[in-house]
Amino acid sequence: MGLGKFLKNLVEGLMALCLLGMVLAVFGNVVQRYFWGTGWVVSEELSRLLFVWLVCLSATLAFGEGKHLGFDLVTARLSGAKAAVLRWLSRGLIALALYYLIDGSWSQVLVGMDSRSPVMNYPLALGAAGTLVMGVCMAVLLVLQSWNELRGHTPTGQAPKAGAQA
């Protein structure tokens, strides 16, 4: 198994654990409230933290697989140099957005190191770290995708070039 497949399986496993934790926290809280009139105090904070990480991990995985939300109405109709220019322009804009995401997330992590959640008392940096990890991983994936295109490999979601091996 290659490194890419291993990392994909690892991320999918972490996503499954986040979802399982959310289901157990919320469902367990509902059952306790219904039957005993009480609940887990940590349920809301835990499920919110797990949801943040679930969203960040799944967005990163979708980006890496080329399944992230995209708008290709124009680029799908183009080929050759025009399509390549628009792809590189798009990558530049994505890189700029990722820069701002990483910079802002890092600032939130630093602020969150000294702030604690009211119930579970975990550092709030743990929540902000989800977007930081997402931004860094997406930036690495963007560089790898760009490198692969420079080497002549087909970009994700694009048809193979004429005469190219699939």
Image (cartoon, grey):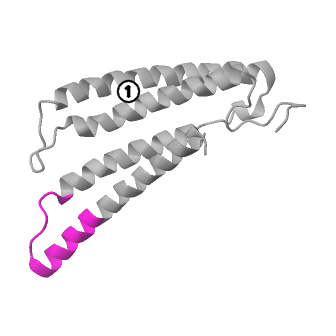
Decide: is 23 above or below 67: below
Q: How many marks?
A: 1
Decide: is 22 above or below 69: below
Q: Quadrant of residue 47?
A: bottom left
Q: The residue tagged with tag 1: helix, strand or loop? A: helix
x, y percent for residue 107: 25, 23
Chief secondary structure of the magenta portion: helix
x, y percent for residue 26: 25, 65
User: What type is the residue that disc 1 sits on?
Assistant: Leu
Q: Quadrant of residue 114?
A: top left
Q: Is residue 160 left or right of residue 93?
A: right
Q: Quadrant of residue 104?
A: top left
Q: Which residues are magenta?
A: 24-43
Q: Is residue 85 left or right of residue 130?
A: right
Which residue lies at the image location 85% right of the left edge and 35% below the top edge? 165
Residue identifier under label 1: 101
Residue 87 included in the magenta stretch of the image: no
Decide: is 8 above or below 80: below
Q: Residue furthest bottom?
A: 35
Which residue lies at the image location 38% right of the left edge and 26% below the top edge? 101
Q: Is residue 161 left or right of residue 102?
A: right
